[in-house]
Image: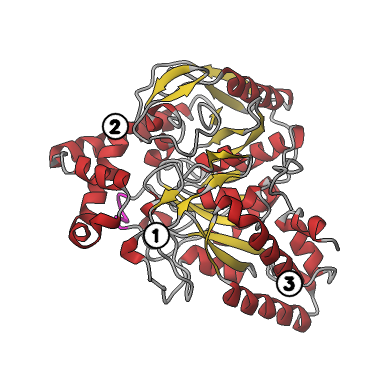
Amino acid sequence: MATESILRLSAADLAAEIRAGRISPSELLDQTLAHIEKTDPALNAFITVSEARAREEAKAAEGLLASTSNRDELPPLLGVPYTVKDLIDTAGVRTTYASAILEDNVPAHDAVAVARMKAAGAVLVGKVSTPEFGHKPMNESPLFGRTLNPWNLSRTSGGSSGGSAAALAAGMAPLSIGTDAGGSIRIPAACCGVVGMKGTLGLVPHDAAPDGFGNFSNQGPMARTVMDTALMLAAMAGAHPNDPHSHGLPIDDYAAAARGEGDLSGVKIGWITQMGNELVDAEVLDACAARRDALEQRGAEIIPFDEAFENTEPYWLIITQSLWVARFEDKLAEFGARMTPTLLRGIEEGRTYSAVDLQRAITFRTQLYRRIQSWFQRVDFLLMPTLSRTAINADHDFYEPITIGNQVAGGIRQCWYPYTHPFNMTGHPAITVPCGIMADGLPAGIQIVGPMMADAGVIRLAAMLEQTHPWAHLWPDAVAP
């Protein structure tokens, strides 16, 4: 099979080809590594290519193929390459968090999500980029430089899982594990035209969160198709002793949901255009409205939500930046000169908050959860843009306002992705899928949000959008396989 046709296959199709003996895991790995070597210099998505571990895992997959007579008993992702954001531990593979603090860190153990992907048969081909400790939505760090958008090398890939999204969009692997504390899976997925999902808080256990009880960071699947996203979620989901949020959550048939079967009769979908922001690019909103209409044509009742909503960024910042102070303050004397200026500024801002400020933010988080949960007494799902515009310039000053439709909008967090961080604070499942290529040649995304533990329902709606407005055939010409 030609390299191009192999590397353009979905993970589900690759797994089927491997089980049928038409592609070998080592053949697929060789072509994947060759494409990474050819493509990554333009994008800078990889921090570490884990060739030694990948070859071991590919050989193990071939051994399992040879020793298993019943193909139905094989792991679901056997031999399929994937990447992992460099905020997630990988045994024997350097994990830096894009920081001088952990520049030479080589974990002894895999994170739970990685261990479960390995058990599902997937082959780890490398660690992909992140801003230092994932602290902002643009992928750049003093250690590794800037990751660029495959659709336009002058634009950001988004962050903080921008290495994951760029690698997926360029065909350097069909799957990636990202992290999302304020939109860090969904922002880059929308920027790069791929799928990204933040499940119900705890569904994919986060065994390394510094604050396990107050945590709103998630590890989750990123892929080019809804089915691949569902297969990853199925592999990674399930309780773990180290994550208090993971216990008791039901596991559904995500692959069945990803078939997008049936109609939406009786399903009510809340349509949201603003969440504490004033400006949304008209072309992006029109593209999202076309997807909304597609769900209506499948039988859904669309209910506009136009009630006032307070931008959640100030409260999100208090919780997040306070944690940065607690995590990094004692590292500044040794490493401060080599840390990212925007992270250092965030730490300084964190020092200005009082304990009362923090408790007010925590209280606000509870109120926000109750309010959004109450929306699901009126509707079954929510639909909205993922971002208010396409990817911003890669060299944009993080503290300068962005523009939307030639108008000055305001700060990046409040005005570019006000739709993402509310659902980190509440824990509700959210998925972004592409909603077309805009006039500037860049992708945009639409976000579906569901009630707690409705991950399968969110996936099903995403699959229906994929059926009516497919995207996986679209590739950025300059770096596509």
Q: Earlier in the sequence, mark 3 or mark 2?
A: 3
Asked whether 240 falls inside the magenta stretch, the response is no
Residue topped by disc 2: 314
Q: Residue at x 29, y 38 (%)?
A: 317
Q: Residues within 10 Å of mark 2 (few under 14, many from 20)?
A: few
Q: Which mark is residue 97?
A: 1
Quick one: 328 or 223, which is closer to the camera? 328
Relative side of 26 to 323, left or right: right
Name the residue tied to disc 3.
25
Q: In the image, residue 120 lies at what x, y percent?
A: 62, 68
- The x, y position of residue 362, in whole percent, is 25, 39
Q: Identify the residue at image location x=54%, y=45%.
A: 148
* CA distance for labels 3 and 2: 47 Å
| Amino acid at dot 1 | Tyr
Q: Quadrant of the N terminus?
A: bottom right
Residue 321 is labelled as none
Dot 3, crowdedness within 10 Å: few (<14), some or many (≥20)? many
Identified by mark 2, the residue type is Pro
Residue 211 is at least partly visible in this image: yes
**Residue 433 falls in image quadrant:** top right
| Type of the residue with mark 3 | Pro
Sequence order check, earlier mark of 3 and 1: 3
Residue at the spot 57% in from the left edge and 38% down from the top edge:
190
The secondary structure that dominates the magenta segment is loop
Per the image, label 2 sits on a secondary structure element best described as helix
Q: Earlier in the sequence, mark 1 or mark 2?
A: 1
Along the line of sight, the residue nearer the viewer: 457 or 403: 403
Task: Please tell me whether mark 3 sits on a helix, a strand or a loop.
Answer: helix
